[in-house]
Amino acid sequence: MISVGIIGCGYWGRNYVRLFDELNRAELIRCADANRATLAAIKQRHPLVDTSASFDEILTDDRIRAVVVCTPASTHYSVASQCLEAGKSVLVEKPITTSSADAEKLSELAKAKGLTLMVGHTFLFNDAVVKMKEFLQDEGFGELYYLHSRRNNLGPIREDVSAVWDLVPHDVSIFRFLLDAEPETVSAMGGCFLKPDRADAAFINMTFPNHVVANIQASWVDSNKIREVVAIGSKMRVVFNDLDNLERIKIFKKGISAQRDINGFGEFQYLLRDGEIVSPKLELREPLKNLAEHFLNCVESGEKPLSGGDDGQAIVMVLEAIEQSMRNNGAPVAIPSQNLSEDL
């Protein structure tokens, strides 16, 4: 059994508290949060768990082998690095840090200490996203043309980062997972409607290898809540709708492709495919529980996490390129080749 501490028990941290208190393989020992009312609520629901207003007690507790960091994004590097220095493996919420240089430092520190460093890119552990990738790799999908995603809602508004850093990591991590590739360029525009110099909405175009293009729309100020990723192929369209509990994945067996005129005139013929619409049966498990169990497996076995520190660094590099493009009125920005740390 792996003893766990959790730092930050607010909006998202409460979910980790519940899960690690329920998992048979984990023993949740202590939770830390600066808000005493939050700690009181945690204590009421989980009376056997110790609580403290400072995470120093987690750092100095020799029983605690692994720590979950759910503090504001701007504090991730400071908190996670202290945990690693104290000899604790770390699961840190996305984004891993707010700079790629800090993300690289965390990866190097975890490697030097022989510890697990994992980032909470939850959608990589979503059974529907995994199923979506299976369809994209099937011959029946045809050639992949492009991907697009929409991630809109009214908040929740973060005070330390923009909507780009809060929402877009989800979609970048999904695209990387579906394509097994890194984006090459990015072009982005955004709007700062609620607070100067902090984008509340962003419209992002990306290019990937093999001429695949992708688009992300992310917003804190759109009243129509949407959580959708779509893949368009020559023979099929696959839609992942995270808000549809009945039909999380839909397959539209419709598409269009082009081929040279066989009569040799050099013109293109367009082949239309018009098939059925399918909603495959999925056995959906809670993604966060899948993630938590994977983290425990990695701590126990020493295997590299599916969303390790190097993956977190790669995504932060994309976010930095997005912000650079936004500052330059949407000018394309080449994403540097990831000079990432070796596998942890």
Image (tube, grey):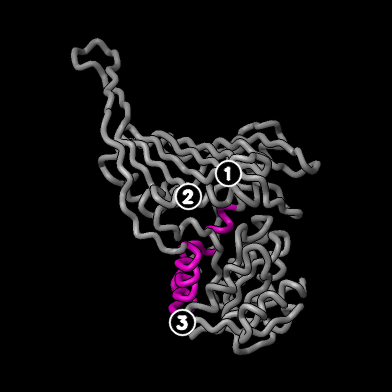
Residue type at mark 1: give it.
Lys
Describe the element under mark 1 as helix, strand or loop. strand
Q: Which mark is residue 24?
A: 3
Label 3 close to label 2 by CB (< 8 Å) = no
Q: Residues within 10 Å of mark 1 (few under 14, many from 20)?
A: some
Mark 3 or 2, nearer chain start: 3
Residue at the spot x=61%, y=80% of the render?
46
- Say whether residue 23 is magenta: no
Q: CA distance from mark 1 to mark 2?
A: 11 Å
Front-most of residues 53 and 261: 53
Q: Quadrant of residue 60?
A: bottom right
Residue 154 x/y as whole percent: 66, 45
Sequence-wise first label, 1 or 2:
1
Chief secondary structure of the magenta portion? helix
Left-right relation of 253 to 213: left
| Residue 192 as seen in the image, left or right of residue 138 | right
User: Would residue 163 be found to the left or right of residue 124 on screen?
Assistant: right
Q: Name which residue type carries label 3.
A: Asn
Q: Residue at x 57, y 58 (%)?
A: 312
Q: Which is nearer the N-term, disc 1 or disc 3?
A: 3
Please rate how many residues cluster around mark 3, counting C-alpha atoms within 10 Å: few if below 14, some from 14 to 19, many from 20. Answer: few
How would you rate the neighbour count of disc 2 (Cα within 10 Å): few for under 14, some for 14-19, many for 20 or more?
some
Q: Which mark is residue 225?
A: 1
Q: Which residue is mark 2?
A: 242
Residue visible at 55% across and 39% down in the picture: 216
Looking at the picture, which amino acid does disc 2 mark?
A: Asp
Q: Which residues are magenta?
A: 287-315
Alpha carbons under labels 1 and 3: distance apart: 35 Å
Q: Whole-percent x and y of residue 206? A: 53, 38
- Residue 4: x and y in percent read 58, 80
